[in-house]
């Protein structure tokens, strides 16, 4: 389809058609205004062609209009890299030899950099790879809020705070779309668990919806200019989110002015009338589970296919609905596959590997260090590496985020490159093959044998580096299943305890897209936390451990001591997670598959706006490691802030300048975080909320001034009575610190 269009595109600048001197139709002229082209193309389409635009023709494509030279749309899973090619009509891989790519760090890692410049670099690089692979829509990034550490898909998102997620998603989208590849921000909205994701109805206050779960999506649309949005599987107010009147028509279109396409998650459509009326444009993956199962129906039986066409012909839904959908789809096609100005793209370049490495470097979080780190490379002691994640390829499995990288450096390879023959390795634990919906059991004999060998070798080593955590198997960090426990899996806690008994010089380097219990934390000299780092992950891990890179990552989510310290689990009520069945058996937990319970479950967000650190702060339940926490190999002092005014007036801001001094001997980066607290309000408010942050490089012995401007918008809450944003007069505090629990300076002011 696209190859047929190439000679036409070459003539666009001349305004000529392929037939000679005849003027090109308006919709083909790239010098014409976009909306005029869209309207011209729309009036040329038949009803059948308009409907055909609205649904898939294969697993990852939608049809164009061949009669008019309008090409199809090619989509690919993301956002951590362009997925390997899938068969036209099955979930099997196509077996191509030229679809290997750069694997970029997971979005939790990107969020842990707290650096919008890294986000822009990420979007640019992954966009170039998507363009080279001739993709028009990259299915990502994801900005669902981290509500529970059991959510199997948290690693694809940007943490627990809407300010952090919103600031980080905008540069990604802007740079990605400069390649003529559409971002598809997902999963809109309230997709905060995988258990029963296809049927669970989320009961949440409008205030929590507006303050916690929607702001990052709004920034993606209003500031990022995302060209597409993916609806989520779950329901809200009884309607599936892929055709939800409130979310799509009222908020996305009318309030935010979204002019792009709404695309279903694969298998997310459930009703033709709702899909017709409630803002859905493109239907993908219907009658499958979006991951592994096949459909017995053809694409012409999708809800927005023949059933929709027949409803239109009978006058049961307005003809305007299909015109609106076709208009949005044409606009997307003109922005992407019919955009002759988009660059060619590139694949697996050294620049892309450098971007992946830089993001990984800045994302690793040093949680604890008693001085054992950095581990110098010029020593002579023997270093034992223990742990399955030291060698496991963590780009495999995980669902739609699975990747086929051309180059991957494992943590063991990275350490061997720096420390040479000082490094030896033993696995320590086993976890079976990557599977989606079940765990491959490992025999007790194997568990015991691996542990005994690791302990015996640890006894003789000078230093032990443990590399474990979660992986992409079922019930870990994996689409389709939630975690079954807050503990580390595969008997890792017992292994860590056993290693500590024989060698106290233990460095724990865990890889995970989620928080987990650490009953051994106070006895381990050093703890590092990383998310999935992609192609260059092993090099980043080795460089941080050795001190070649000074760690600067900060946690994008809290790490509670125990699951019950998390707001969603504090009451122990299954109504709050994973949900209960409504009706005759109300109160009973529901059995069922990951996609559809076969029943009518509802989950209630009883914690309301108190998500993550808001809960820990307000309820005075300390986290083991707080949101925003992350140490360095140097230290930073926060000086006395300079404040422009003690009062914030309408239309003016309070300007704060604070000097940050590197008091150590190494250059380092610090993330200065500014939170706002409302001393007295007519509604419940958290103790404080993140409103601004800046990451700055401070040379050893030098100081850098960090400046923030607080505006009236930073003081607002959503008033459910008036259904508007309100800032009440009174006294506020600006908390400036290195994490949500490490506040260095407090600046009071009035409004």
Image (cartoon, rainbow, N blue to C red):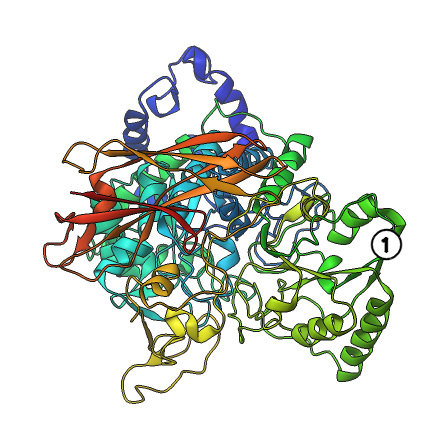
Which of 536/224 is in front? 536
Residue 443 visible in the snapshot: yes
Left of 680 or right of it: where is 441?
Answer: right
Looking at the image, the residue that sits furthest to the right is: 421
The residue depicted at 57 percent of the width and 54 percent of the height is: 401
* Label 1 Cα crowd, 10 Å radius (few <14 / some 14-19 / many 20+): few
Which of 279/433 is in front? 433
The residue depicted at 35 percent of the width and 75 percent of the height is: 576
Q: Which residue is mark 1?
A: 381
Measured as percent of width and height from the top left, residue 645 is found at 21, 33
The residue depicted at 86 percent of the width and 54 percent of the height is: 381
Looking at the image, the residue that sits furthest to the left is: 722
Left of 384 or right of it: where is 657?
Answer: left
Measured as percent of width and height from the top left, residue 121 is found at 54, 34
Measured as percent of width and height from the top left, residue 133 is found at 60, 37
| Element class at badge 1 | loop
Quarter residue 325 falls in:
top left
- Tally the numbered discs: 1
Measured as percent of width and height from the top left, residue 477 is found at 56, 63
Quarter residue 425 falls in:
bottom right
Left of 350 or right of it: where is 37?
Answer: left
Residue 73 visible in the snapshot: no
Which of 249/74 is in front? 249
User: Which quadrant is the C terminus positioned in?
Assistant: top left
Left of 44 or right of it: where is 265?
Answer: right
- Judge whether 168 appears above or below 7 on screen: below
- Judge whether 479 appears above or below 62 on screen: below
Which of 161/653 is in front? 653
- Judge whether 71 appears above or below 681 on screen: above
């Amino acid at each position: 389809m696209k190859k047929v269009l190439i000679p036409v595109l070459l003539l666009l600048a001349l305004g000529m058609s392929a037939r000679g001197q005849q003027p090109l139709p308006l919709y083909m002229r790239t010098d014409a205004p976009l909306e005029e082209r869209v309207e011209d193309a729309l009036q040329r389409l038949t009803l059948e062609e308009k409907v055909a635009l609205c649904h898939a023709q294969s697993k990852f494509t939608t049809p164009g209009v061949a009669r008019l030279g309008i090409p199809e749309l090619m989509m690919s899973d993301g956002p951590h890299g362009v997925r390997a090619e899938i068969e036209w009509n099955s979930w099997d891989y196509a077996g191509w030899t030229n679809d290997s790519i750069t694997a970029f760090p997971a979005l939790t890692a990107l969020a842990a950099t707290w650096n919008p410049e890294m986000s822009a670099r990420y979007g640019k690089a992954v966009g170039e790879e998507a363009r080279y692979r001739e993709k028009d829509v990259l299915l990502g990034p994801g900005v669902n809020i981290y509500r529970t550490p059991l959510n199997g898909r948290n690693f694809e998102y940007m943490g627990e705070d809407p300010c952090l997620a919103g600031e980080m998603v905008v540069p990604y989208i802007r740079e990605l779309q400069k390649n003529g590849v559409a971002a598809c921000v997902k999963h809109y909205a309230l997709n905060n668990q995988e258990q029963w994701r296809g049927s669970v109805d989320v009961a949440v206050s409008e205030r929590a919806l507006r303050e916690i779960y929607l702001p990052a999506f709004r920034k993606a649309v209003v500031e990022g200019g995302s060209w597409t949005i993916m609806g989520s599987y779950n329901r809200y107010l009884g309607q599936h989110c892929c055709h939800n009147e409130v979310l799509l028509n009222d908020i996305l279109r009318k309030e935010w002015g979204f002019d792009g396409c709404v695309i279903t998650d694969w298998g997310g459509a459930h009703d033709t009338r709702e899909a017709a009326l409630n803002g859905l444009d493109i239907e993908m993956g219907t009658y499958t589970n979006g991951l592994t199962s096949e459909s017995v129906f053809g694409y012409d039986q999708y809800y927005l296919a023949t059933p929709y066409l027949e409803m239109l012909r009978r006058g049961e839904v307005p003809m305007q609905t299909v015109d609106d959908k076709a208009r949005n789809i044409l606009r997307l096609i003109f922005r992407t596959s019919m955009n002759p100005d988009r660059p060619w793209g590139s694949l697996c370049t050294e620049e892309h590997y450098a971007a992946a490495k830089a993001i990984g470097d800045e994302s690793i979080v040093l949680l604890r260090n008693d001085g054992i780190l950095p581990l110098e490379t010029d020593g002579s002691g023997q270093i034992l590496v223990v742990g399955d994640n030291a060698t496991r390829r963590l780009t495999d499995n995980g669902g739609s985020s699975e990747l086929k990288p051309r180059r991957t450096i494992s943590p063991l390879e990275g350490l061997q490159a720096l420390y040479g023959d000082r490094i030896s390795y033993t696995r320590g634990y086993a976890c079976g093959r990557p599977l989606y919906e079940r765990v491959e059991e490992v025999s007790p004999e194997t568990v015991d044998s691996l542990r005994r060998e690791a302990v015996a070798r640890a006894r003789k080593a000078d230093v032990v580096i443990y590399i474990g955590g979660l992986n992409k198997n079922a019930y870990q960090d994996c689409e389709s299943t939630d975690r079954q426990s807050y503990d580390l899996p595969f008997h890792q806690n017992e292994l860590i305890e056993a290693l500590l008994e024989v060698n106290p010089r233990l460095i724990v380097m865990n890889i995970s897209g989620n928080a987990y219990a650490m009953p051994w934390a106070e006895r381990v000299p050093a703890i590092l936390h990383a998310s999935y780092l992609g192609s260059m992950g092993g090099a980043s891990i080795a460089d941080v451990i050795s001190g070649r890179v000074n760690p600067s990552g900060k946690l994008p989510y809290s790490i509670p001591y125990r699951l019950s310290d998390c707001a969603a689990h504090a009451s122990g009520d299954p109504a709050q997670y994973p949900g209960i069945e409504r009706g005759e058996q109300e109160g009973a937990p529901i059995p069922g598959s990951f996609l559809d319970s076969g029943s009518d479950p509802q989950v209630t967000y009883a914690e309301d706006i108190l998500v993550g650190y808001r809960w820990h702060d307000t309820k005075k339940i300390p986290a083991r490691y707080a949101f925003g926490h992350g140490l360095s190999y140097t230290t930073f002092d926060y000086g006395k802030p300079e404040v422009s005014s003690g009062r914030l007036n309408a239309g003016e801001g309070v300007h704060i300048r604070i000097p940050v001094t590197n008091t150590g001997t190494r250059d380092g980066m610090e993330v200065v975080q500014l939170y706002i607290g409302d001393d007295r309000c007519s509604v419940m408010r958290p103790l404080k909320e993140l409103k601004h942050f800046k990451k700055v490089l401070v040379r050893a012995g030098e100081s850098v001034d960090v400046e923030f401007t607080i505006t009236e918008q930073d003081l607002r809450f959503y008033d459910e009575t008036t259904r508007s944003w309100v800032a009440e007069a009174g006294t506020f505090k600006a908390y400036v610190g290195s994490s949500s629990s490490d506040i260095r300076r407090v600046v009071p002011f009035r409004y």
